[in-house]
Image (cartoon, helix red, strand yellow):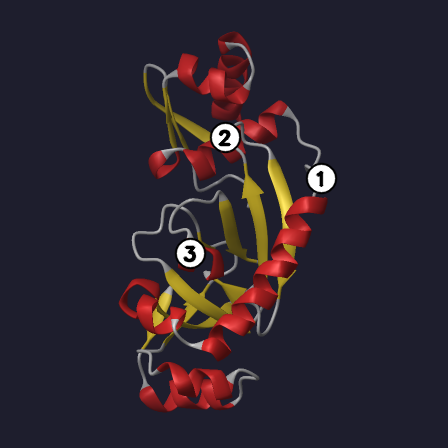
């Protein structure tokens, strides 16, 4: 992830956006963020909630349940919003956005501008349209078929701090499997080089795993 504060480049990106008229009313501290493919663009663990508009590239948006089950919600390209739900319910969702390719977003802090955003009618009209589409997607989604191995890896990546599973029994409870099943999968993952054992009952994903 790379943040860009060059005023000329920011102004050029905003000038080319279909939302320029709304941006001009916000008086926000805009900057750009470049993401590499596979990087998380937004997640419930963000320390600084951001409102982001995809300016170039594509992003995959999905929901991860506590048992590692993954639901694909949508694919966002240019002009797609990220952070609209966080504007009203900060840190309350299990929705993740991941760069599907090299990605550039026009961004600004939600917390620093929350009151201004909530009092801007033009901005709220855009948010209502975006949220309506997302609610429709959530109502219609189906879980992507996933093996227990896939759910374990997903659980480690999205639900464990620092991608590190600590405690076989507790993790097995969340994954709706037996501790023996989970241990077998972790052993297989260690043999394949996708997880590394750090200690008793403690495993971390490795960089060699598939994206």
Q: Distance of mark 1 from mark 3, alpha carbons?
A: 25 Å
Q: Which residue is at a point 53% across and 10% down the rendered structure image?
A: 178
**Taking 72 as reference, is 160 above or below it?**
above
* Residue 180 horizontal/vertical position (percent): 52, 8
Counting other residues with Cα less than 10 Å from the Cα at mark 1, is it few (<14), some (14-19), or many (20 or more)? few
Q: Are marks 2 and 3 in contact (CB under 8 Å)?
A: no
Q: Is residue 40 visible?
A: no
Residue located beneath label 1 in the image: 142
Q: Choose mark 1 or mark 3, whichever is in front.
A: 3
* Residue 53 horizontal/vertical position (percent): 49, 71
Q: Earlier in the sequence, mark 2 or mark 1?
A: 2
Q: Which residue is at a point 41% across and 51% down the rendered structure image?
A: 89
Q: Is residue 197 visible?
A: yes
Residue located beneath label 3 in the image: 88
Q: Distance of mark 2 from mark 1, alpha carbons?
A: 16 Å
Q: Earlier in the sequence, mark 2 or mark 3?
A: 2
Q: Nearer the viewer, residue 59 or 187?
A: 59
Q: Choose mark 2 or mark 3, whichever is in front.
A: 3
| SS for dot 3 | helix
| SS for dot 2 | loop
Image side of residue 27 versus residue 172, left or right:
left
């Amino acid at each position: 992830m790379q943040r860009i504060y060059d005023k000329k480049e920011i102004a050029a990106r905003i000038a080319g956006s279909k939302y320029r008229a709304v941006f001009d009313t916000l008086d926000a501290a805009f900057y750009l963020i470049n993401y590499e493919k596979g990087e998380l663009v937004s997640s419930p663990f963000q320390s600084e909630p951001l409102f982001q508009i995809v300016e170039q590239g594509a992003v995959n948006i999905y929901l991860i349940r506590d048992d590692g089950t993954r639901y694909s919600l949508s694919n966002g390209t240019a002009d797609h919003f990220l952070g609209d739900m966080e504007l009203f319910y900060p840190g309350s969702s299990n929705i993740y956005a991941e760069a599907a390719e090299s990605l550039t977003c026009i961004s600004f802090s939600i917390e620093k501008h929350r009151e201004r955003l909530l009092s801007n009618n033009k901005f709220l009209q855009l948010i209502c349209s975006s949220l309506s589409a997302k609610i429709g997607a959530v109502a219609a989604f189906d879980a992507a078929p996933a093996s227990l191995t896939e759910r374990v890896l997903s659980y480690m990546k999205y639900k464990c701090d620092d991608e590190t599973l600590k405690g076989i029994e507790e993790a097995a409870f969340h994954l709706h499997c037996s501790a023996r099943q989970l241990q077998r999968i972790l052993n297989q993952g260690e043999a394949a080089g996708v997880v590394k054992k750090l200690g008793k009952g403690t495993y971390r994903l490795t960089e060699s795993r598939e994206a």
